[in-house]
Image (cartoon, rainbow, N blue to C red):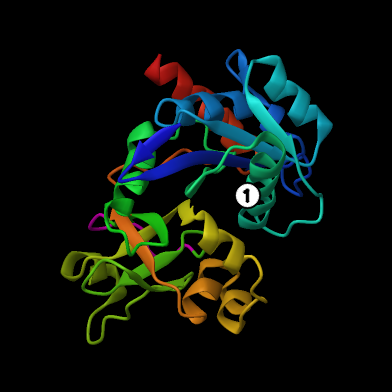
Amino acid sequence: MKTFNGYNFIGIIPSRYASSRFPGKPLALIGDKPMIRRVYEQASKSLDLVYVATDDTRIYEAVLSFGGNAVMTSDRHQSGTDRCAEAVSIISGEKGIKTDVVINIQGDEPFIRPEQIDLLVSCFSDKSVELATLIRKVEPGEDIINSNHPKVILDMSGNAIYFSRSVIPFVRDSEISKWTHIHTFYKHIGLYAYSTSTLNRITELPRSPLEIMESLEQNRWLQNGYKIRTALTEWESVCIDTPGDLENAKKFLDQIK
């Protein structure tokens, strides 16, 4: 098991078969491998212990078939965070594997870089950190309007203050086309790390008003007083939400071969 600063780390990849935009996407082939395998193999380059947490036997069996670790979880979870919490409980209770920090790895990012996971791990060099995530600087001229790309503002210590689908902060007395040239904006990259005890606590919290308004679960944690440490990454993973994204991923694979 990967250890750092006295902590034991585990990677959990929440994965479900049902998807309104792309049913069965974890098993969609990218080259000669299903997407879930590519995510698993990339995560394993950073972490010694990785599990796929799923509610579908097809995904479970596919992971076992390539020699991966998998655990069956409930089909009632509303978020990957909730699925991670159940998975860790099962892994700890049934397999006796005790972990201190959980890395939640998105199951639809087959080209995630191990360096990004390492960045999250490094956040826990500070013993006060309970939650961590990644951010990326928005380049001058880059689109900041797209509501599918959440933005985040930070305090002076690198902790998140707020996440929004709107552009934050608002730049007064300037045309929006110039904003990225006069201020550094940050885009959220949806990779999380939680101390196991914190993970168990935040999944017991009811949905908060700001979470509901923005449809961003991390605002629930902030609104309940938790701090989320951020780490700056230069890379943005290729995320697959639709069959069209899958075709783009195949082209990307051809480019990096």
Residue 14 appearing in the image: yes
Kind of residue indicated by mark 1: Cys
Residue 81 on the magenta span: no
**Secondary structure category for the residue under label 1:** helix
Q: Position of 32 compared to 195: left or right?
A: right
Q: Picture coordinates of residue 127 (x, y %)? A: 31, 59
Along the line of sight, which residue is nearer the eye, 198 or 218?
Answer: 198
Task: Give me the residue at 32% from left, 68% from top.
Answer: 159
Q: Picture coordinates of residue 46 (x, y %)? A: 39, 30
Along the line of sight, which residue is nearer the eye, 184 or 224?
Answer: 224
Q: Position of 197 compared to 116: left or right?
A: right
Q: Main secondary structure of the magenta part?
A: loop
Residue 240 appearing in the image: no
Which quarter of the figure has residue 201?
bottom right
Along the line of sight, which residue is nearer the eye, 221 or 91?
Answer: 91
Q: Position of 154 compared to 51: left or right?
A: left
Task: Give me the residue at 27% from left, 44% from top.
Answer: 234
Report the residue marked by disc 1. 84
101 above or below 56? below
Task: Give me the residue at 69% from left, 43% from top.
Answer: 93
Task: Give me the residue at 63% from left, 46% from top.
Answer: 88
3 above or below 205? above
Span of residues in magenta: 139-146
Q: Residue furthest bottom?
A: 173
